[in-house]
Image (tube, grey):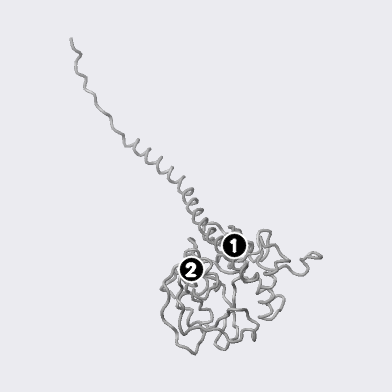
Amino acid sequence: MPPPNIRRTRRGFTLIELLVVIAIIAILIALLLPALREARQTARMSISLSNVRQIGGAMVNYQLDNDGDIPMKLSYRDNGRASGWCTWSYGGKDNDEWWRTRFGGLFDEPGYYRPLNPYLYPDQAFLKPPNSRGPIKDCTQYRAFPGCVYWNEGHPIDESRGDIELPVFRSPGDQYTHQRRWPNESPEASSYDDVGTSYHVNIKWFYYLNDVQGLPFFDAFEEGLKRIRLASDFDTSSFVWIHDEVADIVANDETKRGMMGQFGRKNMSVMAFLDGHADHVYVEPFKYRTNDYTFVFPRASDVPPGG
């Protein structure tokens, strides 16, 4: 006799089983999210480090072509006298139009005039702003350096700006500029969009020579560039050349003990050093010199005999 037909039924998931599976998935996601977030921040930081390495390498090449000088220059007014200098004139794209009219246009630095740009973008044609700048006839009168330029307030301002983007000067973590107070309608503007670069030249050595040691403006600038050119009394592997804005803020404010860096780590800044290498460094609040970095030259008392 053939066996009787046995009807089989398939049992589905119970509600409890389904909830358990959902709970397990949620726990796994919660465990993985921090790791994924950290991996994403590390990848973004790697891009920024690659950027400053390229900028640092270009700076070394610039030094070879210019007797050891680094691409830093003073800002001049219409009368040919230097009135200051800014941390973004070394390289980067055109800064925002806001800077044309502030401070008499003193810190308006179109990409055409930034000396490091041809080293990083040799095939890029930069727009020269007509009727806006001209060479000073006698730079040596003011003990300035070759190639100095100034804002000519007596000529009409060209309203056009280039739309050239220079990605190597943009940090993936750059979200807000600290170079000025933006109007309320655009608080999200980055340093790159504001002044043309996310990375700023270290000028703390200048303030140290000017304010602490009391050297006059030009003397402090010349003395600093001379020391950088010779590099005889400090370690170039720890002397900071450029950094993101975090370093500038934390090093100048002793209250910044928990400032979030651009890549999710407190008081951490991307830096390129004078020897061309780059690193992600912890900045101690209100400290210009640590074992990991230095922004200023050693004092006479710090230099060993014969050093």
- What residue is drawn where x is 34% and y is 38%? 18
| Outermost right residue | 305
| In this picture, residue 209 sits left or right of residue 32 | right
Indicate the amino acid at tag 1. Answer: Ala
**What residue is disc 2 on?**
192
Q: Is residue 220 above or below residue 46?
A: below
Q: Is residue 216 above or below residue 272?
A: below
* Residue 166 visible in image: yes
Residue 125 image offset from top left, x and y in percent: 45, 72
Q: Which marked residue is nearer to the observer: mark 2 or mark 1?
A: 1
Kindly identify the residue that appears in the image at 61 percent across and 79 percent down.
146
- Circle 2 packing at 10 Å, graded few (<14), some (14-19), many (20+), is many
Residue at image x 50%, y 88%?
A: 153
Q: Secondary structure at mark 2?
A: helix
Q: Position of residue 283 (x, y in %)?
A: 62, 61
Q: Marks 2 and 1, Cα distance to the nearest angstrom?
A: 17 Å
Residue 306: x percent and y percent?
81, 65
Please say whether residue 255 is visible from this viewpoint. no
Closer to the chain start, of discs 2 and 1, is: 2
Residue occupied by mark 1: 272
